[in-house]
Image (tube, grey):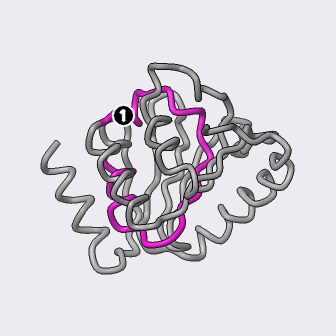
């Protein structure tokens, strides 16, 4: 795992490398998210299942998320399932601690590929993205410096966010 961590970190350093790479499995997903939190400066957007804990309970993920929020980073999150009161989903404790930096909404829309399979995605600072094409096995395409692809993902995120604004998830 150290080799993968070093590889991902090297691509994210100094503004990111415009290189697509792939990951699969919850451990790789946690490394990618932790790296995005580590190198993000201002805003992250996430469209996800709901933080079951399989990825988000990873200690590195949680540490880098908290450091990002301490630096004043902002998070906008759309979840397909409200797990905010599920004790297995430890990340909500961090969300509650930094609730002024975070907006979480129950998604009123879905994103699918051309075959109708669900997609999840995250973007940071209008340049980094992780596009999860396999929501069961966490298979994803990642790039730390592709503003054009992030623009497309932002478009879908913002459309779903508009229809989801009336469904906030309380972090109090």
Q: Residue furthest front?
A: 172
Q: Residue 24 magenta-drawn? A: no
Q: Quadrant of residue 133?
A: top right
Q: Residue furthest top?
A: 87
Q: Residue at x 61, y 39 (%)?
A: 171
Q: Residue at x 14, y 51 (%)?
A: 3
Q: Residue at x 59, y 40 (%)?
A: 48
Q: Is residue 17 above or below residue 96?
A: below
For disc 1, the marked residue is 25
Q: Is residue 72 above or below residue 22?
A: below
Q: Secondary structure at mark 1?
A: loop
Q: Residue 33 magenta-drawn? A: yes
The quarter of the picture where the N terminus appears is top left
Q: Residue furthest left?
A: 2
Residue 92 place in picture, x, y as percent: 50, 35
Left or right of 112, for residue 94: left
Q: Nearer the viewer, residue 142 or 162?
A: 162
Q: Quadrant of residue 94?
A: top left
Residue 61 place in picture, x, y as percent: 33, 45
Q: Nearer the viewer, residue 171 or 138?
A: 171
Residue 139 place in picture, x, y as percent: 45, 40
Q: Few, some or many C-alpha atoms within 10 Å of disc 1 (few <14, some 14-19, many ≥20)?
A: some
Left or right of 55, for residue 170: right
Q: Residue at x 64, y 51 (%)?
A: 103
Left or right of 83, for residue 114: right
The quarter of the picture where the C terminus appears is top right
Q: Nearer the viewer, residue 20 or 73?
A: 73
- What range is drawn magenta here? 31-58
Residue 160 place in picture, x, y as percent: 79, 51
């Amino acid at each position: 795992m150290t080799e993968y961590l070093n590889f991902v970190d090297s691509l994210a350093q100094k503004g990111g490398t415009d290189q697509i790479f792939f990951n699969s499995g919850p451990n790789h997903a946690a490394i990618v998210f932790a790296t995005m939190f580590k190198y993000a400066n201002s805003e992250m957007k996430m469209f996800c299942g709901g933080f079951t804990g399989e990825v988000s309970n990873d200690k590195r993920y949680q540490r880098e998320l908290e450091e990002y929020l301490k630096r004043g980073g902002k998070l906008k999150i759309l979840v397909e399932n409200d797990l905010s009161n599920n004790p297995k989903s430890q990340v909500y404790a961090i969300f509650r601690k930094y609730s002024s930096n975070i907006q979480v909404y129950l998604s009123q829309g879905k994103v699918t590929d051309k075959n109708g399979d669900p997609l999840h995605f995250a973007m940071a600072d209008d340049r980094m993205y992780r596009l999860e094409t396999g929501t069961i096995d966490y298979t994803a395409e990642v790039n730390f410096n592709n503003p054009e692809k992030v623009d497309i993902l932002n478009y879908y995120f913002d459309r779903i966010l508009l229809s989801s604004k009336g469904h906030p998830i309380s972090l109090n």
